[in-house]
Image (cartoon, rainbow, N blue to C red):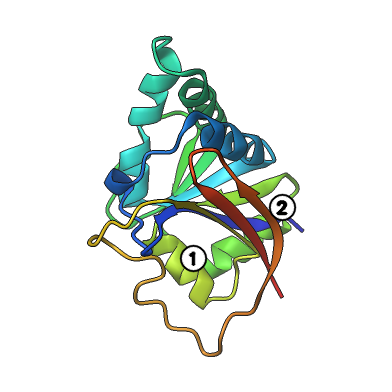
Amino acid sequence: MRKLIFAINTTLDGCVDHTKFNPDEETFEYVTQLMRDADTFLYGRKTYQLMVPYWPDVANDQSTTKGDNEFAKTIVSKNKIVFSQSLESAEDKNTKIVRSNLHDEMLKLKQEQGKNIMVGGVDIPSQLIELGLIDEYLFVVGPIVAGEGRRLLEGVNLPDKLQLKLIESKIFESGCVALRYLKQ
């Protein structure tokens, strides 16, 4: 069965607003390597509209850093599934819009042949956490206290606490820390 991995950048105070966090080259390289073990990315409409067309433009721009460029090329190369009731059409050829039940669609996707599935953003991952469908968590914590902005797992309602097992931690020169956890 394919693993569903939730990956997100966060500040020390749990802010996941993408404008409050800017990963360094080493962090980009680390996350890009993990992304290569996936063949499908899941997004909600808001996250999808942030990622595309931004990263395809970066992939075509040779003036960016190597880390930015490799990250961008990896994103562009993957299949994307967008869960949305309002998105009219996809902006790239390898994106499928799904309007059906999130739970049922995820169970079906996890049973299909392929590599890992990665999910980013806040709304769709929060729903998947509530449904108990996330298998692994990757938090990249930046050495920043934002003081404001959307918080990690804000509004998530769990029937029971979620027990995780730390499987990897990596400290970067920038002070960022990557924490990988498996659901127990």
Q: Is residue 120 visible?
A: no
Q: Is residue 86 visible?
A: yes
Reply above or below: 37 against 122: above
Percent x, y of residue 142: 43, 50
State the image quarter where residue 15 is shown: bottom left
Residue 175 numbered mark, or none: none
- For the point 31% across and 41% down, which residue is it? 49
Percent x, y of residue 141: 47, 54
Kind of residue indicated by mark 2: Glu
- For the point 33% across and 66% down, which residue is it? 151
- For the point 41% across and 24% down, which residue is it? 56
How packed mark 2 is, by other alpha carbons closer than 10 Å (few <14, some 14-19, many 20 or more), is: few
Q: Which residue is mark 1?
A: 102
Reply above or below: 73 against 124: above
Of residue 26 and residue 76, the one placed in the foreground of this image is: 26
Reply above or below: 120 against 66: below
State the image quarter where residue 172 is shown: top right
Percent x, y of residue 139: 53, 56
Q: Tell how many labels.
A: 2
Percent x, y of residue 147: 24, 62
**Quarter the C terminus occupies:** bottom right
Of residue 25 and residue 87, the one placed in the foreground of this image is: 25
Q: Which residue is mark 2?
A: 112
Tag 2, which secondary structure?
A: loop
How packed mark 1 is, by other alpha carbons closer than 10 Å (few <14, some 14-19, many 20 or more), is: some
